[in-house]
Image (cartoon, coloured by chain):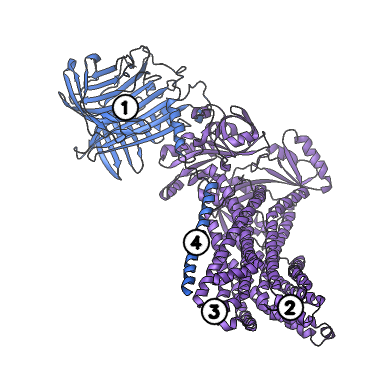
Amino acid sequence: MIARASFRHFRHHPWQLLLLLLGISLGIAVVAAIEITTDSARHSFREAQLQIYGRATHHIQAQQPIPEALYVSQRREHSHWQSAPVISSLVKTTRGENLLLQLIGVDPLREQDFRNQLGRISGGDVGFSDLQTSPAAVMARSTAAEIGVRLHEQLPLITANGKQTVTLAGFLEDDGDPRLQQLLLMDIGQAQQVLGMDGYLSHIDLILDADEVAAVRAWLPDGVQLEATEAALSERAQLASALYFNLQALGLLALVVGLFLVFSSVSFSLSQRRPIFAQLRTLGLTVNELYRYLAMELLLIAAVGTVAGLLMGIALAQLLLGVMLNTLSDLYVASSLSLLFLNPLTLGKLVLMGVGGCMLAAWKPCQQLAHVPPTSLQQRYLQERTALQQSRLLARYGVPGLMLIAWVMMLWHGSGLWGAFAGIAALLLAGAWMMPMALNGLSHLLERQLSGTQLALRKPVLLMLIRDNRRNLSRTGIAAMALMIAISTTVGIGGMVSSFRDAVQLWLAERLNADLYVSQTRVLPGVRTPLPPEFIADVAALEGIEAVATLRRTQQSVGGRPVSVYASELPIPMRSAYQFVSGDRDVIWQRMAQPDSVLISEPLANRMGLHAGDQLPVPTNSGEREFIVVGVYYDYGSDNGRILMPAATFTRYWSEPPYGLTLYLADSARLDDIVQAIRERWGGALDLSLQRSSVLLQRSVEVFNRTFVITDVLRLLALVVAFVGILSSLLAIQLERQEEVSLLKAVGLNRLELVSLLLGQSLLLGFGAGVLAIPVGELLAWGLTHVVQLRAFGWSIPYQPDLANWLTALGLSVSAAGLASIYPAWRFAHQQGIRRWE
Amino acid sequence: MGVRKTDMLKRGFYPLVGLLVLVLFLAVGLHQLLDRSDDNSEDAEGLSLTDFLSAGSEHEKGFAKARPDYVLSFPGDHLAHPAFRSEWWYLNGNLQHRDDPQQRFGFQFTIFRQALATQEKTTGSGWLTPQFYMGHTGLGVFSQGRHLTAERFSRQGPGLAGTEAEPLSVWLEDWRLQAEQSDDLFPATVSAGVKGAFSYRLHLVPEKPRVYQGEEGYSPKREEPGFASHYYSYTRLRVEGELKLDGETIPVSGTAWYDHEWSSNILAEYQTGWDWFSLQLEDGRDLVFMELPARPGSGKRNFRQVALFDVTGKHLSVDAQLIQLEVRDHWRSPSGIRWPSGWRLQIPEHDLDLTITPRQKNQENNLSVRYWEGAVKVTGSHNGQGYVELTGYE
């Protein structure tokens, strides 16, 4: 019977059910879309990597290809360590659309333990000896079809070793599995020849147990590392962690907004049915029965809403993944596969989030409903009084408590990233709890200003509007909270993103302070072709050049993460490119002249807890060396950190040749002449890329901005969801005022007055929410930039409040509230006659 | 009314839980569909091995052939002969615990070489050398009734497997037979095994000189002329060394036998395999007897080879056709093959009537190539010990 009553209720108020479902599903949809997209992107990268690493638990690698003799001696001395030699390199086919392929050279005899792609070979009766005796390769059948290569045909490649040709000897039966579609599989010997790596391996794969790991480490010579594949994989995943992090934060906030929507919808739908429940209670329904019924109804609605949200989220993720992977390929070298990955764990988590979140959000309203004595359930004023009392209590005790938690979590560095998130959540909740009282206060304030004035006397509806607003707090307060949260997160994330953008652009402009950057054109991502020494000498001798600095780079594992070590001659003009966190510039540069002095970037300093004067151990070609940190500079280029040292120091420990030149001209106006001169002298011999700093800056900023495309898209999406949610809950509230409107009409309010009453109330609510959202949003933005970014990436970003964000917040808030009232106002205004109480 | 309500609640609850479970199942199913796991790895091995073992069967041309006029020369001929298609270095031995002669062991060590193609030009890269190596080893632990085996593969590569003159050695990764002096293979040390399972390191000292099989090392394998191998042996090597088994080091001593053989064509179409006996008699004589049965209905005769060496290593003449071999017993292995398991071998010419009994029946090498390779005890007219190798049984 109770179910029938509810059923009838929802049949009479179908939009209420719809809105309830919409609230849940929209919230879940955004979270799901973000979770699934990031999951998929991570998974895609992982899968692409797994093609290279296979089932290996570890691999032996060095900064440069390792001599194959190391592998041979491992097999001859310690053959019980399961191992396999691997050559891997990105190559491009000139067939088709310059497709990037992952060339992997393996020893088929050692493959069965490591990779199983060989089991998928078919066509052309390809066997081991075919692969060994000629430069033959196998690739996915679908990829071959795509670029139009048939069996036994030649496949021209652009490799790090120049143009090469291989013969297609067979197919990998990929069955549409994208993980195989980028592979070009060869015998290791032939791969060495094609890539010009005779005598060298890219890495050695190993399957080791815990005891063996230490033994292998002890056995390895200096300059060669043993790395756990898991670590390597997560390292690659960390490449994109800055982006993932931004998305994750967005997802979390979207969930908070979504749950608030659920909370407000459930509260509203329950408060609507109070009279029915009251009747049932007086008929003898026990509290427990009512409880169980409500729980079941909610569970059903939550389940349906969550599933719908999940489906929407999956569809959304499909769209987002493309954008995301484009962004990632822009940023990072690793090629990736576009594969939507539905991790059961994530899906389970989302279902739990949706259903659990709903139950949690609904728990309070249900409890209230079930515990109120039946008689008072019917009395509206009691409802309002309790609501007001409660919000007063919350504002008085809850808000300061929450603010304290937020404060402690944000300032206490030891609480870590999760502490920072907890702080932010507390901050948001405090803002929300403050909302009803803030509205109440706003109404009081306006009332005091208005009462007694001419305006109030002439337009009594104004005072009515304000007082009525206060009276309705139990219904509208929650919607206002949701609105405030949605708006403040928009402000907060907007503030963080714009501060980050500003900081990075400023940093790029400072860093790119040379007139011209010279390097060889990169054909393959990640492959830096060295510049010949005679070229460098020749360019340095050109007339009109004030200073020349070479660029060298190597990557070393420092503190368990890959850190780029850069080196240059660091001439005087270059030095202005570096801004130090602390210390006197001149002193720092003086100290750099001493042997083994290095500068480190802020993220590295923060991650390792290093300060000027500290020692930093770095693996070199001749074993680990201690370097002296003389300064810490601002850098947003890598959250893993960077090390900068003089070229003279670098060449003592590493052998990488210079890959780039930066030129400082005596007279910048002569830039064109210099470019011309270099092109004339060397254009024929080298494929040079000569970039002016202005162009380079513009390009860097473009790439950087592209990485924010997805953030922007998602932010917009979260905003839309919040907007729709708020709109719908306000709409529901307004539409429910049928009886009240009838009464007002009966009292003699005309159409205009009615409309302005309804609209004015909404606008007031929107305005109140918008105003409160600004300080909350700013605090949030501050927390995100100063606390969360620092803890997550180690870099500090000066936070700059953005006035435009404030206006957006107010505009959004007021227009959402306004829009929500237009239709009900219009409808009530046009209703003929007076409807009586039902 | 109250009863009806609770009933309904109950009835409503389970379908709801069911719905949730269904949703989860759908999600998992969808995931499985999208993320088809790829556990079809069993073929990976197939590709390499069948390819290796069958490679070149149809193109024997281009490989060198054993010639009767070839004179073996040492130490050079201890090394690999890459111009020939197949080659193996082989050791077997009957061992016993140094302190407890009742604890008996048998070991076999083989490194096979197979050329995948004729090696016309020498390419720079060792990886491209078309030579494939396979190692097999077996260890019989007769006091426990165990037979342990292990197998290795590698291409020659840039030093992964092969032979070299300085020091004189043949190896496959860390399995190795290495001379202790530069002028001859023996005395030598052999070591092989699988870490954590079993391994051995044995010192081998010749008790008799090197002997040549067939005609001065030219050993025919069929009736038809021109099908032969180059083949020599050390029929009696004194063994001192140790086994590692179950984490325990066992000092052992005993007697071993060494073969080195290479050719480009061993088995004819009509030949299915071979039964091969290497016996060391207590009177100091050593006997090798080999029978290559012809497929029934092929119209060919079984092909036999025999050689008897006296205490000094002198080749005694034996007429292979006068030898009688009788299978006395059989054993069906867990893999389903019915192996001969016990023989009577009669060579009236030399008053030999030998009963050959496996030290244990289970000495099957169930590796990528399946054969029976086991230590035997010799009784009858003369006592002794030896090893028997049986191939081609199905």
What's under tag 2, amino acid-wise?
Ser
**Disc 2 designates what residue?**
A742
**Disc 3 designates what residue?**
A281
Label 4 neighbourhood size at 10 Å, few (<14), some (14-19), many (20+)?
A: few
Q: According to the colouring, which chain is purple?
A: A
User: Within the image, what quadrant is residue A724 found in?
Assistant: bottom right
> With A705 as the anchor, is A62 left or right in this view?
left
Where residue B393 is drawn, which disc sits there? 1
Total residue callouts: 4
Q: Position of residue A533 (x, y in %)?
A: 68, 38
Query: Is the same chain shared between marks 3 and 4?
Result: no
What's under tag 1, amino acid-wise?
Tyr
> With A90 as the anchor, is A819 left or right in this view?
right
Chain letter for mark 3, please.
A
Spatial CA span between label 2 and label 4: 43 Å
Q: Do residues under tags 3 and 1 come within 8 Å of each other at their CB atoms?
A: no
Label 1 neighbourhood size at 10 Å, few (<14), some (14-19), many (20+)?
A: some
Mark nearer the N terminus (4 vs 1): 4
**Looking at the picture, does residue B290 appear above or below residue A84?**
above
What's under tag 4, amino acid-wise?
Pro
Label 3 neighbourhood size at 10 Å, few (<14), some (14-19), many (20+)?
A: some
Q: Position of residue A46 (x, y in %)?
A: 56, 48
Spatial CA span between label 4 and label 1: 62 Å
Q: Do residues under tags 2 and 4 come within 8 Å of each other at their CB atoms?
A: no
**Image quarter hosting the C terminus of chain B:** top left
Q: Position of residue A464 (x, y in %)?
A: 76, 82
Which tint was used for chain B? blue
> With A235 as the anchor, is B360 left or right in this view?
left
**Looking at the picture, does residue B118 appear above or below residue A467?**
above
Q: Would you say residue A640 is visible in this rendering?
A: no
Spatial CA span between label 3 and label 1: 87 Å
Element marked by disc 1: loop
